[in-house]
Image (cartoon, rainbow, N blue to C red):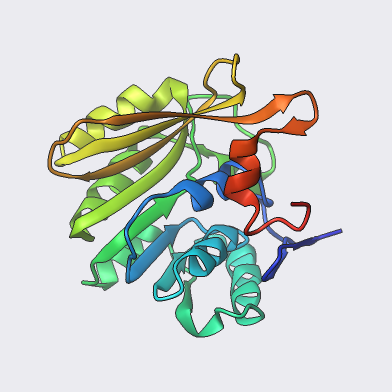
Amino acid sequence: MSIFQFKQFSVDQANCAMKVNTDGVLLAALAEHNNPETILDIGTGTGVIALMLAQRFPAAEVHAVENDAPSAATAARNFQSSPFAERLAMHPVSFQDYFASTQLKYDLIVSNPPFFLNSLTNPNEQKKAARHTGIKFFEELLEDSSAHLSSAGKLALILPVEITPQITSLAASLGLNVHTQIAVRSFNSSKDHRHILIFGFGKQEMQNEAFFIYKQEKKYSQQYITALKPFFTIF
């Protein structure tokens, strides 16, 4: 079944290399900002992150970019069929081309990027593009995002823990500092497997938070339920 039903909208996943997944929904649920007016989702895939952010921030205009044509077309349909259609805009281009074409500044930029650096690639070209990248991608992502953030803007990324130091260092060289780091674990006793990093301009004491998905086998944690309850029909 290609349709993923949320409480306020539905997501058709047909022709999308990256389906609705835990990384994406956690980023959308946990990305922090005080009432952003403008939001950009880079590499929107199905459009699920943009849709969740449109629900979370009802005064925000939400833009999304996606350079995989089939995914972009599917996301555009998902946007149009949602209750937030008037506040959603789809740009079927690379983020590099989009940023080169606009002077807009965003209060919140989010991305669940491809992050398998220097790893075995997927033989399926569409999935390869969605999941694998090189360090140049992150250099361009951070440089372009920093140039298009408002002065109080936030950039939120979800990454595997192994590349967090490298990305944090790159961001710092552009004046972006980690204001919040959320360590995502399967269980409270597990090792971190993802970090949600929330960057902003200016230095401040970094807030470290821990987020675990399960309290026990097949039982979601209260943190997870609280974060996803506004969206998931199972809660």
The x and y percentages for residue 15 are 72, 61
Please name the residue shown 46% across and 74% down the image. Answer: 58
The x and y percentages for residue 191 are 55, 15
Front in this rendered view, residue 102 or 53: 53
Please name the residue shown 33% across and 65% down the image. Answer: 36
Residue 6 placement: quadrant? bottom right
The x and y percentages for residue 184 are 53, 29
Please name the residue shown 62% across and 59% down the image. Answer: 230
Judge whether 228 appears above or below 10 on screen.
above
Q: Is residue 210 left or right of residue 17?
A: left
The residue at the far right in this view is 1
* Quadrant in which the N terminus is drawn: bottom right
Q: Is residue 124 left or right of residue 26?
A: right
The total number of labels drawn is 0
Please name the residue shown 59% across and 38% down the image. Answer: 223
Judge whether 7 appears above or below 22 on screen.
below
Residue 142 placement: quadrant? top left
Judge whether 176 appears above or below 232 on screen.
above
Judge whether 117 appears above or below 47 on screen.
above
The x and y percentages for residue 144 are 25, 54
